[in-house]
Image (spheres, grey):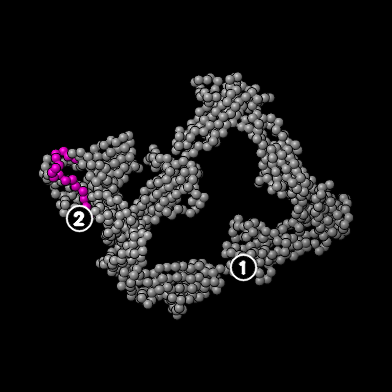
């Protein structure tokens, strides 16, 4: 007879001495969404396959105490638009209508402050199949006349898919292949985007004029159906051809209505026409219908390139471009350039002088300039030259050069820019040349070199320019590399030398440069000065809020520190208790006049001194507050969520019991916990059962337990637990407990499992314990356990590994027979599974009833087994006594073993 026994053997993870049941986080990822399959690939990586558009649901199951917090992150794509910046803090990650870009590796990080965080990952593979695209091409060297008078044609089929698609080419309803038709060749080209298969028709024959279908398939993965596209090849098939109704460059006046027609001159099938604009979209009000583009009342901003594109999937698209230029002029400027050869920066008689004039225009090369002196046209002479396109100046600039400046050359010069014959207003600029025309100087007004303002207020930075004429002032940042001005520009022009800032912020603090422009004035080295802007802002302090716990009668020191502020000093600090002003605390020994913190010392925490303390810190600009909540309240309990099989069912009464376990958070921080107040309320009910649970001295990490009884199947309950000390009630913790069908014969921590050999058992009967299925993620594992084999009728204890690669295959890994004495001994068994596996313990009955075999403390860990056996020191307890054995810290866990069947 073979008996496979039911049990749940939960092993407590290893923890340090003095930490009690505190244990590092353990995590496991499971799926609960619309997965096609969850598989292990060649490197034992978990892969979750899902169809695009379905709902992804991943759950991170955690153990550990205190209850770990879970955070989801990912790489290789984005789970949502803001997923990588704002991680998902939840045990369940849910993504509706998942997109292909959201595939990648998802990480579940569980941490509870004990040991290192647990990090598990799973790769999400999003499956999809787009509509295929079929295009027709020919060899470039064969282009002459009609497209399909050539001998070779290429049909190219491209598709985006995951996994890679399989291609099937058909002519009519017949599938094409190399072996069946020498006139075709099917191959995959290099350097193509997406997946591509080319059907090459060699030496085009009459039967090649037919309908061709490209069918793509991902072999019904995730239920994705096949897709296909068909193209009919005829002797008239041709690529698109275009011509325009206007020249490629079209110059118009503002306000005119513009119409451009794009005419098809070839193409079969009939090409599709589309208009586009670069840069940006088509202008507002523009209408593109068929091949006609209409732009009513065109403006200067509508200038740009307009593209007409024709496509019919034969050959390359045909494209024609119109460069639309709307006449306009703006930004008339002038420059005064003293004698360059003599490196002069001043106007001097007897030296050369150049006046330059420029406007920004469209089209730039069509602008004409005319110079006037004292209201009359300037006449060319040996000493007065007018030039265009000076290489030292911007393109299409007009310059008037005065050679050997005379006193008679002084006067007012006017430059007029125009578009002859166009309804565009002229632009002009005036330059006065005299003995008073001097280059500029720049300086900061007295008392304005440092400007100090409060955050949120306006600020004005000023530089004064002297000289004639006075050029504009250009402002920029100095102390920050590549920093922009508040306007978002690297340089800002001001005609009056004043930079006005609205609602300044602290990041605007710094040094600003003002310098003269080289236009609308002298074309000489810029003059510059600097202004310092200091933005004052209120202090920032820490802690903004702090919970301070201490036992009754013990002292407490409260400290409020200045993190940042402008000015960076504490001008005053005011302490209050429950809103009432407190006397100023004494200064700390050695503290100077300028301090970055304020302290308040409480000699002893009492019920009267418990409450809210507030420290208001000021730096003369504003204030900030540190809040302290001082009390001797106990911290909240920490519920233990890893209790093995906490539910106990009572079939006859239809009631159930629940094992509630918890630890006390930081029990030594305050007075000892005397008892707990327990409140149990059925959900959707108002009445609650309340009970006091007395306790002795509670240690850090000590696991406390209470059995909740008379709970009604299948209802859920809210449990509230409040610790009480001599101070009174502490912080309450709550949780919801749910009824779950209990597993029979639980093996709680501190108990072992054994096989019973008394009657009616017979010689050779077998009992098996079978583990859950594990996914092999390492090359070697070590199974460790304690065994007890004492009695003259002892049979055998076997350890088997069941491989799940191809069916179920059981392999003996370890075996022991006979009486081994009244001691617990430990075994370490190395295994190297090649894929998913289970562990099986098998006990074989000997010749009589004096042959019980027991096992305990089963662990499974990655890596090789220790070379030296650990000496056992286990306290022996006879089976059936109900007395737990001495507990031992576990090496790795938890491991759960379940009953699969009872068979003979």
Does dot 1 land on a helix, a strand or a loop? loop
Which contiguous range is marked in magenta? 748-766
Which is closer to the viewer, label 2 or label 1? 2
> Left or right: where does residue 646 sit relative to residue 501?
left
Q: Quadrant of residue 560?
A: bottom left
Q: Is residue 749 visible?
A: no
Relative horizontal placement of residue 351, taking residue 7 as reference (left or right):
right
Q: Residues within 10 Å of mark 2 (few under 14, many from 20)?
A: some
**Percent coordinates x, y for residue 131 in the rendering:** 54, 36
Screen quadrant of the N terminus:
top left
Q: Which percent across, then down, holds residue 324?
A: 73, 43
Name the residue furthest bottom.
583
Determine the residue positioned at 38% across, 46% down: 30
The image shows residue 542, relative to residue 644, as above or below, that is: below
Q: Residue at x 39, y 38 (%)?
A: 41
**Which dot marks residue 315?**
none
Of residues 139 and 508, the one drawn nearer to the viewer in this rendering: 139
- The correct choice, above or below, for 461 with respect to 481 in the image is below
Overall secondary structure of the magenta section: loop
The tag earlier along the polypeptide, 2 or 1, is 1
Residue shown at the point (28%, 48%) measured from the top left: 896
Residue 716 part of the magenta segment: no
Give the residue displayed 76% in from the left and 53% down from the top.
330
Q: Nearer the viewer, residue 378 or 410?
A: 378
Where 12 falls versus 759 (above or below)? below
- Looking at the figure, which quarter contains the C terminus? top left
Q: Name the residue that disc number 2 marks.
A: 884
What mark, if any, has residue 457 been given in the picture?
Answer: 1
The Cα atoms of the two marked residues, 2 and 1, are separated by 74 Å
Residue 558 screen position, x and y as percent: 41, 72
Element type at mark 2: loop
Q: x%, y% of residue 584?
A: 46, 79
């Amino acid at each position: 007879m073979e008996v496979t026994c039911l049990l749940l053997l939960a092993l407590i993870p290893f923890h340090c001495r003095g930490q009690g049941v505190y244990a590092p986080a353990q995590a496991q990822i499971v799926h609960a969404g619309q997965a096609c399959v969850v598989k292990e690939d060649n490197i034992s990586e978990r892969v979750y396959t899902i169809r695009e558009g379905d709902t992804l649901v991943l759950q991170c199951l955690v153990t550990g105490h205190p209850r770990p917090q879970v955070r989801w992150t990912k790489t290789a794509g984005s789970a949502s638009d803001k997923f990588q910046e704002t991680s998902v803090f939840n045990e369940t990650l849910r993504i509706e209508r998942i997109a292909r870009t959201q595939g990648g590796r998802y990480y579940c990080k569980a941490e509870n402050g004990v040991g290192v965080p647990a990090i598990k990952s799973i790769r999400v593979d999003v499956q999809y199949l787009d509509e295929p695209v079929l295009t027709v091409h020919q060899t470039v060297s064969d282009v002459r006349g009609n497209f399909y008078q050539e001998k070779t044609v290429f049909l190219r089929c491209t598709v985006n898919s995951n996994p890679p698609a399989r291609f099937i080419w058909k002519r009519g309803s017949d599938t094409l292949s190399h072996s069946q038709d020498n006139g075709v060749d099917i191959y995959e080209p290099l350097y193509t985007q997406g997946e591509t298969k080319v059907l090459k028709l060699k030496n085009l024959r009459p039967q090649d004029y037919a309908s061709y279908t490209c069918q793509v398939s991902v072999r019904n993965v995730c239920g994705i159906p096949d897709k296909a596209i068909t193209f009919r090849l005829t002797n008239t098939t041709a690529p698109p051809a275009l011509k325009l109704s206007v020249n490629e460059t079209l110059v118009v006046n503002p306000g005119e209505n513009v119409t451009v027609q794009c005419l098809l001159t070839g193409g079969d099938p009939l090409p599709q026409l589309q208009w586009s604009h670069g840069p940006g979209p088509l202008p507002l009000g523009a209408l593109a219908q068929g091949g006609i583009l209409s732009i009513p009342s065109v403006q200067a901003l509508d200038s740009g390139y307009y593209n007409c594109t024709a496509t019919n999937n034969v050959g390359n698209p045909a494209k024609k471009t119109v460069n639309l230029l709307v006449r306009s002029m703006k930004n008339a400027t002038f420059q005064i350039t003293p004698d360059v050869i003599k490196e002069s920066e001043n106007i001097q008689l007897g030296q050369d002088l150049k006046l330059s004039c420029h406007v920004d225009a469209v089209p730039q090369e069509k602008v004409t300039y005319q110079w006037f002196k004292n209201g009359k046209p300037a006449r060319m002479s040996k000493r007065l030259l007018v030039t265009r396109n000076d290489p030292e100046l911007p393109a299409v600039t007009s310059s008037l050069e005065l050679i050997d400046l005379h006193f008679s050359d002084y006067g007012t010069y006017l430059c007029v820019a125009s578009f002859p014959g166009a309804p565009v207003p002229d632009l002009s600029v005036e330059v006065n040349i005299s003995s008073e025309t001097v280059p500029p100087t720049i300086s900061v007004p007295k008392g304005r070199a440092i400007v100090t303002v409060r955050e949120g207020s306006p600020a004005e930075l000023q530089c004064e320019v002297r000289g004639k004429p006075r050029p504009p002032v250009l402002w920029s940042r100095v102390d920050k590399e590549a920093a922009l001005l508040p306007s978002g520009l690297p340089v800002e022009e001001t005609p009056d030398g004043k930079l006005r800032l609205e609602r300044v912020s602290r990041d605007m603090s710094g040094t600003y440069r003002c310098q003269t422009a080289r236009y609308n004035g002298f074309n000489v080295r810029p003059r510059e000065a600097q202004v310092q802007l200091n933005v004052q802002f209120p202090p920032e302090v820490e802690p903004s809020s702090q919970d301070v716990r201490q036992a009754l009668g013990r002292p407490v020191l409260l400290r409020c520190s200045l993190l940042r502020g402008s000015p960076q000093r504490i001008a005053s600090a005011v302490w209050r208790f429950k809103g009432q002003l407190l006397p100023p605390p004494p200064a700390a020994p050695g503290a100077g006049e300028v301090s970055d913190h304020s302290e308040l010392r409480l000699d002893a925490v009492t019920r009267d001194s418990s409450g809210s303390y507030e420290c208001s810190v000021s730096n003369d600009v504003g204030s900030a507050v540190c809040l302290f909540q001082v009390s001797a309240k106990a911290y909240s309990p920490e519920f233990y969520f890893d209790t093995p099989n906490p539910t106990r069912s009572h079939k006859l009464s239809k009631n159930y019991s629940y094992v509630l376990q918890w630890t006390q958070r930081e029990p030594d921080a305050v007075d000892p916990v005397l008892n707990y107040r327990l409140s149990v309320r059925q959900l959707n009910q108002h009445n609650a059962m309340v009970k006091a649970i007395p306790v002795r001295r509670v240690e850090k990490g000590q696991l406390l337990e209470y059995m909740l009884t008379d709970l009604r199947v299948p209802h859920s309950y809210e449990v509230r637990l409040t610790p009480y000390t001599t101070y009174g009630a502490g912080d309450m913790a709550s949780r919801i407990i749910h009824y779950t069908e209990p597993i029979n014969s639980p093996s709680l921590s501190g108990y072992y499992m054994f096989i019973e050999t008394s009657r009616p058992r017979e010689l050779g009967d077998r009992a098996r314990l079978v583990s859950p299925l594990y996914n092999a993620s390492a090359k070697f594992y070590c199974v460790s356990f304690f065994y007890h084999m004492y009695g003259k009728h002892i049979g055998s204890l076997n350890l088997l590994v069941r491989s799940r690669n191809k069916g179920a295959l059981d392999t003996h890994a370890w075996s022991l027979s006979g009486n081994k004495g009244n001691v617990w001994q430990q075994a370490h068994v190395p295994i190297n599974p090649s894929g998913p596996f289970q562990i099986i313990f098998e006990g074989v009955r000997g010749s009589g009833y004096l042959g019980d075999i027991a096992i305990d403390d089963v662990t499974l860990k990655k890596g090789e087994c220790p070379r030296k056996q650990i000496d056992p020191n286990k306290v022996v307890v006879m089976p059936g006594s109900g007395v737990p054995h001495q507990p031992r810290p576990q090496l790795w866990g938890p491991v759960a073993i379940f009953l699969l069947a009872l068979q003979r």
